[in-house]
Every structure is written in structure tokens, then in C-alpha cells.
Image (cartoon, grey):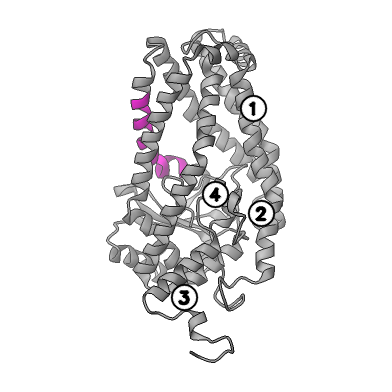
Amino acid sequence: MDTTPDRRPVPGPDASPTADSARASGHSSGSGSGSGSGFTPAERARGRALRRAQLPWALGGRLAGLALTLLLGLTPAGAALVTATGGWFGGSRTATVLAGAAALVVLGQVLQLPFGAGVRAVRARYGLVSQGWSGWALDGLRGLALALVLFLPLALGLFTLTAWSPQHWWLPAAGAAVVLTIALSFLHPLLIEPVFNRFTPMPPGEQRTALLALAERDGVRVRDVLIADASRRTTALNAYVSGFGATRRIVAYDTLLTAAEPREVELVVAHELGHVKHRDVALGTALGAVGAAAAVAVLGLLGSWQPLLDAAGATGPADPRALPLLVALAALLGALSGPAQCAVSRRIEARADRHALELTGDAEQFVAMQRRLALVNVSDVDPPRLLELLFATHPSATRRIAAARTWQAARGRPTPEQRTSPGGSVV
């Protein structure tokens, strides 16, 4: 269950979790110990080992990317890069902006290659990768092309506004950021998701009928139920609901449909319907739009501060050589706001869990579903609290299962621990 507000899956060569390996959770109800969250020491150790093995690569990639961005933005190195690449295409202002933006994107992607490859190698050892290196490289090229298509027009529009008004460019730019955030959220399932996955309608049958009936019972209108061919890339299990209005659809990984029981699939989808019911994607889009506008305003303030411009080797915000500085400031703002975004996401995910429980009334199957997801995805079911606070977009598996047990007990329904005394007799 990976649908956080406006955070739909987009695979790539460096698409890897840090503490988010603790987010999705669960395996079938027949394994594990019979108390608490039901995970055996061996199951806990396996998820912990994967997290420890991939964390240096995943966290290293984040830190290296931020360090490179700050180096280019806060020293004359970035200005020199933008000037040199612009010179290759004639040296005009437009050529300098576009070539400089492309250079920043390509350099950042190249830096991430060894870290993404390291994460992929670790996950392959744990049986989570079904894609060859050639497919991984192709996904990387797709991601690079997508980044260029999105960032180059953005950079050109930004410096068109700074040329119009070096002091007040951020006002129309903030409005444009709001519009772009909303537009990308709406267009994501139509234009971006198909770049990385192929989607086919779920054939008529009991599973499709049950999922559509679940959505109808929840009062959520969905256009279709689609199957994503995730198995060509991963063995991990997932599902999500994307789109607005006429574009809304339930999307299930083919791996989930193969590995999970039909009732468990329904519980995953019930969680995702909770996001729709509570307008989490719309809320996330609105918050993202407000955050983007606020970030542009901060960039307008900091990007005009002369000491920063001097450090970056730029004369002013309208100078194309200021592009690396603006990118660095945006990256820093994103990094600083990350833990707060994760905290909001965890609360939203916990609410969607409660919605799934209320919609289905099936705490036992919910726990079984959480266990299946955790074990198949090799999640760290109880990660260090600091990592969870900094990086996790979902509560850990043990927290989600404990919350389900609390919900179950609050409604007078005995949990397994209440049904069985310490001596094994029925209470």
C-alpha cells in the first residue's frame, strides 16, 4: 500500500526505500508466532538485515545528491558549468538556460547511478528484483528523459520571468507553481505512469466484481480496475488508486494478485479507497501547491540576496548563472521539509488503515494482509525510531498491526491474545 498523497509509484534506477522498507507490512496468517504482531525472530532479522544492507546506498545517494547540488549552487563551479555548456550551443541566454538545466539534470542522474545500482544489487540478493540490468538501465534512461522534459521548460519559464522583473519574478512564478502542481497531479496517471508500466484492464471475474463492489459500498466512483505489470521489475506487492474523477482507477500490481489471497487484495484496496474517501490525493495536491508557492517565494527572497549571488558567481536572479543557486536552495528546502512531510504522510496512512478496518470490519484479515506485505516485501517491521521519523512515509508493520488490534478490542471483538490465556486455554 504505497499511495501517499500524490506520491504514486514511479520506478527508476534509484527508486529505493530508506526507512520506508518499514512501511508496507505483512504475510499470510498461517506463519509466525501467535502473539503481538506475529513476526518470528527470523522474520524480523531478515527485514532488519535488508534495511541495514541498503541504507548506506540509499542514504548515501541522498546525501551525495544534496552535496553536489550545494557545491554547484553555492560556489562558482555551477556558474562555470552553466556558462560552458551554454557556450557549446551558441552562448545565447536561452541556450545557456536550457543547456545549463540539462547539464544539472544529467550530472545529478549520473551521480546517482552507483547508489541506485548498489540498492538494486542488495534487493536482488533478497529476491526483490526480477528485472535485468538492461531493463534497469532502460528505466534510468526513461527517468532521465522525463526529468529533462519536465525541468527544461520549467527553467526556461523561470528565467523568462526573472528577465521580466528581477525583483518581482517570484509572484507570477508562485502562481504558475500552483497551476503546475495541480496539472501534474491530474496528468500523472495519464502521461507519467505509462512511461514505466503497462496497464491492462482486470478481466471480468470474482476479483474484479468484489473490488468494484467494495468501491461502490464505500461511495467511491472508479473508472476501472487495472493490473500493472510490476512483475517484470520486482517481486514486491502493492496497489494504489490514482487519478481524479473520470481518470480515477484502482491499480493492482500483478504480483499482489498472484501472491495474496483475494480477501487480502480487498483489504489493500480498502486502504487505498480510504485515501480517496478522505480526499487525501486532493488534499496532498492542495498542500503541495501551497508548499510550491511558498518555496518559490522563499527562493525569490534568498535568490536575490547578494552574498549568495556572489558566492554562486552570478550577478542577479536574472543571470542564467544563478540557476544552480536556485536549484540548490530548492533542494535544501525539500530536504529540510522532508521529515514534516513524512510525519503528515504517516498520519494519513494510519487514517486509511482505520478506514479499511471500518469498511471491511475484518481485523484478522487486515493483520494477515499486513503480515503478507511485510514478509514478501522484506520490510523492517520495527525500524529504529529515528529512521522512521526522518524517512518513513508509512507506520511500521508492528504499529499498523497493533493499531488494528486496538481497533478490534475497542469494538468488543476479542483479539487472539484475549481468546487464549497464557496457559493455552480459551478465555
CB under 8 Å between callouts 1 and 2?
A: no
Q: In the rendered image, is residue 295 in sight?
A: yes
CB under 8 Å between callouts 4 and 2?
A: no
Residue type indicated by callout 4: Leu
Spatial CA distance of label 4 from label 2 is 15 Å
Which residue in the structure is indicated by mark 2?
51
x then y, percent, for residue 21: 59, 54
Residue type indicated by callout 1: Leu
Q: Earlier in the sequence, mark 4 or mark 2?
A: 2
Q: Quick check: 55 left or right of 263?
A: right
Residue lying furthest bottom in this view? 425
Q: Quick check: 125 left or right of 85?
A: right
Magenta stretch, main secondary structure, is: helix
CB under 8 Å between callouts 1 and 3?
A: no
Which residue in the structure is indicated by mark 1?
68
Spatial CA distance of label 4 from label 3 is 28 Å
Q: Is residue 46 magenta?
A: no
Q: Earlier in the sequence, mark 3 or mark 2?
A: 2
Which residue in the structure is indicated by mark 3?
364
